[in-house]
């Protein structure tokens, strides 16, 4: 482990600030100040080694030693120009080992002169205007996150250059026109001539090209040959008047096969691992004549947003996909020519993940001129292609996109007054409404009232039904007794006899009909076969009868009173006398 230009300050540890076992430690231009430990700022154990140079130890506190402690057969490889002052604890202020104490040799802290937490200058901070200079800068860089700037309004001619294609294998590498996060709109950085410009290899991530124009190449401008974990983006980049196989080739070279100049992309072996992901945003392809396609995607993922494709010629369409996926949004395709069906061609097994706000017009293609052709069988030049045409869905060319969400709002959320002001409405045009004023309250109230009415109706119905069922047995018993006893003829009277069977049957039917009134009685319809059809007032029971109000006429009330009087008179005159049901029944 090597520590260079590091700083350890005010740490309180039980063992050591740097504790190493059976390890080789290199410490250079590093500062240790005001640390508290048992075995010193640095402790190497179990046959380890230490190389120490131009480092400083100031104000440290230790038990055995405040600075360096070597134990268990560990050795000191280098002790050069180190400085110590104000350290306390133990008998050795320098390097304590099994061989004794070795003092530091420097009178001053040399780490102060060169000590910085970051390099004073960053690679690639100046711009380049010559292709060979750009190639050398990228080749000599060993740091991720480096931005290489092409001077605005410069043309880098690759024709006759001794530099080969520039390999990019470091994460977060950016090739940019001008200074800033976005290329200046009034500048132009052109790379022209030659065959291949850039090649992305391995699993390199976050590679960016910003504001670059690729012109008159006769090969492939950018070889996106990374694996499934790699990704790159092109922002405000342009391809014009170029030829060759493609503008950009997405192909996992390690999992498929080496790409050679002049190879027929359509014959490439499908990679056994996924190719990389490439995003094109606000880019343009104009006046190019490609053998395969402007964007050739073999086994990878291509995303195209806010881009234009105009007056291009390609065998497989301006975008050709083989065993990969494509997403297009807010992009326009006009006056392009292709041999295979579709302005965009997707081979069998490829996937169209999005086709949103896309526009096409005046494209010269045999089939599916203004859309994406997705083949359902394997097909190529000279073969009949069968597939599905997915038309572009917009009637106008609109390259603006809905911006993606940001990590935090750029402005505070708008208030109601802000929204109404933007709509030219007064804030008091809308009134805040309480629950009592809302429609929900009225609806809730109506439902509660209807529920109470229904519950009350059911209560009185069942109460009436229970009372009727309770009275039915007594009435039936009294009728049966009357029919038996009254049926006996008076002694000495001829022609009188018991009720005949017809009268008994009618009585039983009437009783059964009364017990079957059920729910019909609830709605006022009396289910009684002996109900006289000429008594309309009795048939009008309805809800008035439900709530206990008897809907009878005055005549009916008089008839009831007369019948009750006659019954009482009969009961006074009649005296029944009987001893046993088997004996003769007599009465007077």
Image: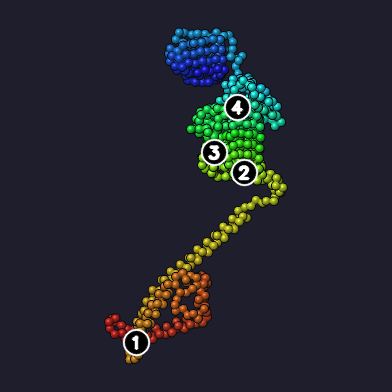
> Picture coordinates of residue 391 (x, y %)?
60, 45
- Residue highlighted by disc 4: 196
Tell which of 345 and 57 is nearer to you: 345
Left or right? Give the position of 486 relative to 363: left
Distance, label 3 to label 1, CA atoms, is 114 Å
Q: Percent position (x, y) of residue 335?
A: 66, 40
Q: Which mark is on residue 380?
A: 3
C-alpha separation, residue under disc 3 versus residue under disc 4: 26 Å
Q: Which residue position holds label 2?
A: 370
Q: Identify the element where label 1 is drawn.
A: loop
Q: CA distance from mark 4 to mark 1?
A: 130 Å
Q: Position of residue 400 (x, y in %)?
A: 65, 40
Which badge, 4 or 1, is on the more N-terminal residue?
4
> Residue at (37%, 82%) from the top-left corner?
502
In three-dimensional space, the C-alpha distance between marks 2 and 4, rounded to whole angstroms, equals 31 Å
Mark 4 or 1, closer to the camera = 4
Query: Is residue 344 in view from this perspective?
Result: no
Q: Earlier in the sequence, mark 2 or mark 1?
A: 2
Please tell me whether mark 2 sits on a helix, a strand or a loop: loop
Q: Earlier in the sequence, mark 2 or mark 4?
A: 4
The residue that disc 1 covers is: 497
Colouring of the image: rainbow
Residue 479 vs 172, above or below: the answer is: below
Crowding at label 3, few (<14), some or many (≥20) Cα neighbours within 10 Å?
Answer: some
Q: Residues within 10 Å of mark 4 (few under 14, many from 20)?
A: many
């Amino acid at each position: 482990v090597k520590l260079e230009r590091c700083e350890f300050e005010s740490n309180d540890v039980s063992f050591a600030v740097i504790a190493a076992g059976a390890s080789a430690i290199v410490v250079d231009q590093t500062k240790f100040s005001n640390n508290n430990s048992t075995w010193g700022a640095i402790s190497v154990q179990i046959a380890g080694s230490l190389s120490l140079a131009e480092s400083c130890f100031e104000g440290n506190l230790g038990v055995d030693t405040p600075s360096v402690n070597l134990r268990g057969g560990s050795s000191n490889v280098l002790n050069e120009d180190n400085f110590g002052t104000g350290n306390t604890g133990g008998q050795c202020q320098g390097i304590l080992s099994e061989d004794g104490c070795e003092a530091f040799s420097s009178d001053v802290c040399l780490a102060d002169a060169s000590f910085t937490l970051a390099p004073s200058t960053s690679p690639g901070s100046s711009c380049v205007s010559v292709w060979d200079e750009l190639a050398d800068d990228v080749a000599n860089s060993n740091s991720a996150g480096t931005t290489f700037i092409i001077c605005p309004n410069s043309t880098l001619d690759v024709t006759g250059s001794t530099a080969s294609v520039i390999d990019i294998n470091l994460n977060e590498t950016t090739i940019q026109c001008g200074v800033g996060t976005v290329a200046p709109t009034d500048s132009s950085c052109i790379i022209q001539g030659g065959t291949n410009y850039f090649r992305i290899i391995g699993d390199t991530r976050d590679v960016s090209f910003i504001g670059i124009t690729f012109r008159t190449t006769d090969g492939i401008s950018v070889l996106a040959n990374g694996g499934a974990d790699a990704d790159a983006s092109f922002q405000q980049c342009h391809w014009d008047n170029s030829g060759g196989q493609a503008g950009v080739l997405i192909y996992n070279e390690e999992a498929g096969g080496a790409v050679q100049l002049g190879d027929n992309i359509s014959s490439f072996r499908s990679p056994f691992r996924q190719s990389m992901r490439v995003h094109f945003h606000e880019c343009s392809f104009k006046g190019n004549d490609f053998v395969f396609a402007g964007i050739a995607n073999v086994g990878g993922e291509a995303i195209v947003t806010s881009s234009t494709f105009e007056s291009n010629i390609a065998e497989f369409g301006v975008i050709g996909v083989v065993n990969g996926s494509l997403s297009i949004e807010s992009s326009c395709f006009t006056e392009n020519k292709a041999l295979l069906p579709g302005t965009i061609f997707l081979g069998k097994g490829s996937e169209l993940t999005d086709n949103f706000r896309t526009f096409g017009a005046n494209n010269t293609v045999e089939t599916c001129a203004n859309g994406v052709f997705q083949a359902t069988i394997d097909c190529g030049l000279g073969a009949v292609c069968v597939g599905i045409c997915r038309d572009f869905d917009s009637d106008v060319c609109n390259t603006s996109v809905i911006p993606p969400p940001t990590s935090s709002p750029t402005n505070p959320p708008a208030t109601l007054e802000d929204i109404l002001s933007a709509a030219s409405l007064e804030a008091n045009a809308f009134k805040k409404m309480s629950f009592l004023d809302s429609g929900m309250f009225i609806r809730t109230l109506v439902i509660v009232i209807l529920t109470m009415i229904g519950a009350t109706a059911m209560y009185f119905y069942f109460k009436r039904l229970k009372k009727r069922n309770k009275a039915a047995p007594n009435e039936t018993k009294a009728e049966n007794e009357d029919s038996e006893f009254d049926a006996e003829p008076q002694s000495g009277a001829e022609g009188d006899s018991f009720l005949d069977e017809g009268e008994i049957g009618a009585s039983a039917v009437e009783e059964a009909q009364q017990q079957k009134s059920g729910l019909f009685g609830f709605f006022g319809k009396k289910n009684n076969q002996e109900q006289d059809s000429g008594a309309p007032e009795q048939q009008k029971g309805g809800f008035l009868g439900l709530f206990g109000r008897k809907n009878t006429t005055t005549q009916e009330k008089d008839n009831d009173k007369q019948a009750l009087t006659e019954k009482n008179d009969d009961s006074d005159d009649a005296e029944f006398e009987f001893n046993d049901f088997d004996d003769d029944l007599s009465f007077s």
